[in-house]
Image (cartoon, helix red, strand yellow):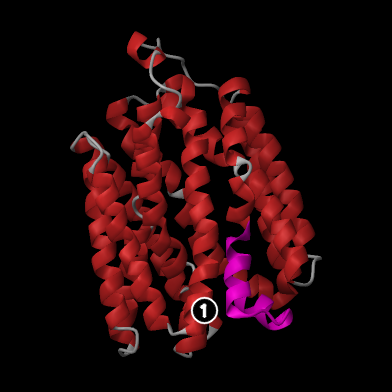
Amino acid sequence: MAPLLRERDHLSLAETGFLISSSLLGSIVSLFPWGLATDRIGERFVLFAGLTLCGAALIAAGYAHGFWPLVGLLSFAGATGASVQSASGRAVLHWFPTAQRGLALAIRQTAIPISGFVVALALPPIVHAGGTLWGFATMGIACLAGAVLGVLVLREGPRADVPAEAALAPMPVRDRRIWRLSIGSALLIAPQLCVAGFTVLYLHDHRGLSTGAAAAVLAVMQALAIAGRIVAGRWSDVVASRLRPLRAIALAAFAFVALLTLLLEAPLPLLVPVLVVAGVLSMSWNSLSFAAVVELAGHSRSGTAIGLQQTLLNGSGAAYPGLFGALVAASSWYVGFAVVALFPLVGWRVLRALPE
């Protein structure tokens, strides 16, 4: 809905980028408390309460006009919807052993590209028929349906005995390994938010595609990202390591975003495949980082560790789109993508220092 909101409310490219990231901005203040709450009262209530409030905020956003009202409501939606991160991630940790956890978390993480695929196909005709009111209402109702489904089917997983060394492990906020993993992941997320997040705007504003055609490219990217996450998760189970595949994907993302930068003015039949691959790689690694952090923290502190990691990811993620939009507006798309290409390379360097 970004092009329509931008035209309706006279938003600059930087304001549009900030609006895109506002839900992440809201989650910064809530992810860690949601993680603590999940460890103490369980996944079921946290999921239900958070998604119910998130759905209500999105429905209210459909009636809002202007930059700041939208930012406020979307930030609140992000703050409440962030409950999903710790609740669903901790549930997977409870129910699956280590040898299956990479694939299980990867399947859980496909929720993001699946929803992106569905939204990219379904939202343009909904918005065309009923405007942004219908678009926000559709997303809000989906969240309310998720809250009901979660409270009906989610149960606490079996609690394994906690080994003595795990009981003596440092709290997540004092564990340097978790901080390094989280910082490296926060660098890797830049292409996901700037390449995938701005695909429609770039193709529509700069290359002249219709909104529907640009959204179709994003839909293909999201569909392939579903397979990418599953393959990455299974790969990590086979090699019994989350970090080796994570580092490899970081290098591949750097290579393809750099190649994309060189091809920004190339004919569309050459540009679009590289754009799609760069987007798929930028969205394929999340479950590996997620699995690594919950395994480092252990069963009893997994919710808190997820909250800490996701706070850093969403904190940086909230900044990236706005900064990217401002950079492109001040210079060019070429400069913007060239800078973004460096982030996964630096992330790979940070992750190299982590022991297997």
**Tag 1: amino acid:** Leu
| Nearer the observer, 162 or 138 | 162
Q: Is residue 19 left or right of residue 329?
A: right
Residue that numbered label 1 is attached to: 201
Rendered residue at 76%/50% (across/down): 56
Circle 1: element type: helix
- The picture places residue 157, in percent across and down from the top left corner, at 49, 21
Name which quarter of the figure residue 318 lies in.
Answer: bottom right
Using the rendered image of the protein, determine whether residue 91 is visible from the camera's viewpoint: no
- The picture places residue 326, in percent across and down from the top left corner, at 53, 76
| Nearer the observer, 165 or 270 | 165
Rendered residue at 47%/49% (across/down): 313
Using the rendered image of the protein, determine whether residue 101 is visible from the camera's viewpoint: yes
Q: Is residue 334 left or right of residue 173?
A: left
Q: Which residues are magenta?
A: 1-22
**Residue 14 in magenta stretch:** yes
Determine whether 54 is above or below 32 in the image: below
Determine whether 40 is above or below 12 in the image: above
Rendered residue at 34%/79% (across/down): 272
Q: Quadrant of the N terminus?
A: bottom right
- The picture places residue 223, in percent across and down from the top left corner, at 40, 61
Q: Overall secondary structure of the magenta stretch?
A: helix
Determine whether 320 is above or below 128 in the image: above
Determine whether 86 is above or below 299 in the image: below
**Residue 243 in magenta stretch:** no
Q: Is residue 235 left or right of residue 323?
A: left
- The picture places residue 259, in percent across and down from the top left corner, at 25, 75
